[in-house]
Image (cartoon, grey):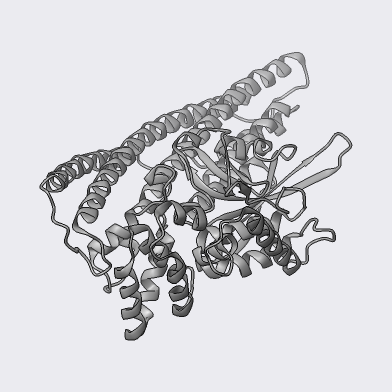
Amino acid sequence: MTESTTDRREKLTKYRKGIASANDKDALIAEINNALGVSEPVGSPHTIETLGRGYKRQSEAAERVRDRVNKVSKCGLPEVWAGSTGAKAGEVVAAAGRDADQMGEAFHHVGLRLMRFAEQLKNAKELDKDGRHELNQALAILDDEDGTWDNWFDDEASERVLRKAQEVAGDGVTHRLQGAIMADEGARHAAREMNKYASEARAGRMYTDELSDADKLALADTAAQGGPRELNELLSANDLERSGQRMEKMNAKDRAEFEKMLADSKTPEERAYLTKALAAGSDMNSIDTFQGKIHGKDPRWLREHLTPVVTSEDSVTNGSTHSVQFKGQKWAQGGFAQEGTCVASSMVTARAMVDPVYALDLTGGESGQESDPDAFRARLVAEQHRVHEEGHGGENWGGMDLTGKEKVAEKEVSPHTGTKYDYTGMPNPDARRDALPDIENAVHEGKPVPIGVEGYNEQGKRSGHAMMIVGQEGDMLQIYNPWGETKWISEDDFVNGHMDKAASGMPDAYGVHIPQ
């Protein structure tokens, strides 16, 4: 069976060490044969390049669609309804134009990434071929004139032959390892790019006949104020899919009532938050009460009360920090980041990110109309303490074990994303690298990923901390730290033990709870 890309890297790294440390002929021969037994990089560079060129051609077609949509938008559209939810024609056409832009960008970048991967895979295969040749050459050096391994003597000449073969074999296994790394990294980056753009094709995820395509497009296009639209869409792919499923299962009375709520909404943002509440699992009575609290509120008020994390355009750089706050009060453990309720606090904020009804309970109180930061802090800390006790956290609001962490993830977040969380240990860089695709897929879908980090001081005392991965862009991960901030960390930092850039003194990500 062909190894995974990570297995290939691990084995070749191991055999390179074995070749370098071999002190006799038999040991060296065994390590060379082990290195030769590792499978070569798989895949057809020609096929991948052909696919890439096909995607690039599609980007040109998307540009033509965008141009036609833009012409329509300049024709002085009347203020008419385009869908049953209350989306106006101008709103829908603007959404269609942005959607065409995104489609063209997706085809273009995926095409380029595939073509680059094809070149990387071609080079990886050439490196691997060279390495195999050198390993076989090393075996030939060790062979005697009769073609057997028998005539070998413990003398200076034999030692020189051994070291020469060892040098050639070392070059060979190094070239094979370089090829394996090149193929692995190229494949991961291509997959990351394709998964990202696939998740952004969100309107098509709302599988319901109860709304028109115009309605779906307008909902998928709605974003929170305060940052770039493409980084702050209110409805994730998971939200759109779950809300569509809920609508399909509604009885006629509830469906008509919900569609009327959407049609009566004063802004696109109000419609989107109602849809997000449906996706999060709220029943019709709760959604009706929720609309009564948010109806007619302007987009800024809605964003402040219902969206804890907003990503600004200038924040998406490695190491940048953004405060997560409501009216100056941070979404922080214990209110001032002074308690050890990091697990519970991460879960509370993660739930607020996916469930706007819950977010409003915290920010707006029972009436939903409050804007007092002190009252918000009291409610926030009370919720953190509740969840901490739910997970049987430590005394004096300190610490929670993995069992408790899994329990609160399943109780507080899973019901509102529709997904179960499974723990994945990450004891080394290879394990963290293996976990990245699943982490990225989850956050692209709109499912926060709990992560544990740790570090040891000079005396060997361990410190641990819980955070949440809430976003991904390019080669960076967006980390929510319950000290009341988000930080962007490069994937290299995540893999190679530099998470102390997000949580001082704790460089290693030791485990994640990945949504399934």
The residue sitting at the right extreme is 459
Residue 512 lies left or right of residue 118; in this view the side is: right
Q: Looking at the image, is 416 positioned above or below residue 508? A: below
Residue 321 lies left or right of residue 340; in this view the side is: left
Residue 196 lies left or right of residue 379; in this view the side is: left
Q: Looking at the image, is 279 positioned above or below residue 315? A: below
Residue placed most toward the observer, 504 or 147 = 504
Q: x and y percent of residue 405 in the render?
A: 70, 61
**Which picture quadrant has residue 25?**
top right
Identify the residue at image location x=67%, y=66%. 408
Q: x and y percent of residue 416 in the render?
A: 52, 67
Q: x and y percent of residue 346 in the render?
A: 64, 55
Q: x and y percent of residue 371 in the render?
A: 56, 56
Identify the residue at image location x=52%, y=43%. 5
Looking at the image, how many numbered discs can be counted on the residues?
0
Identify the residue at image location x=46%, y=30%. 129
Residue placed most toward the observer, 486 or 492 = 486
Q: Looking at the image, is 45 positioned above or below residue 370? A: above
Identify the residue at image location x=56%, y=61%. 370
**Which picture quadrant has residue 11?**
top right
Residue placed most toward the observer, 142 or 268 = 268
Q: Is residue 2 visible?
A: no
Q: Is residue 122 visible?
A: yes
Residue 384 lies left or right of residue 185; in this view the side is: right
The residue sitting at the left extreme is 75
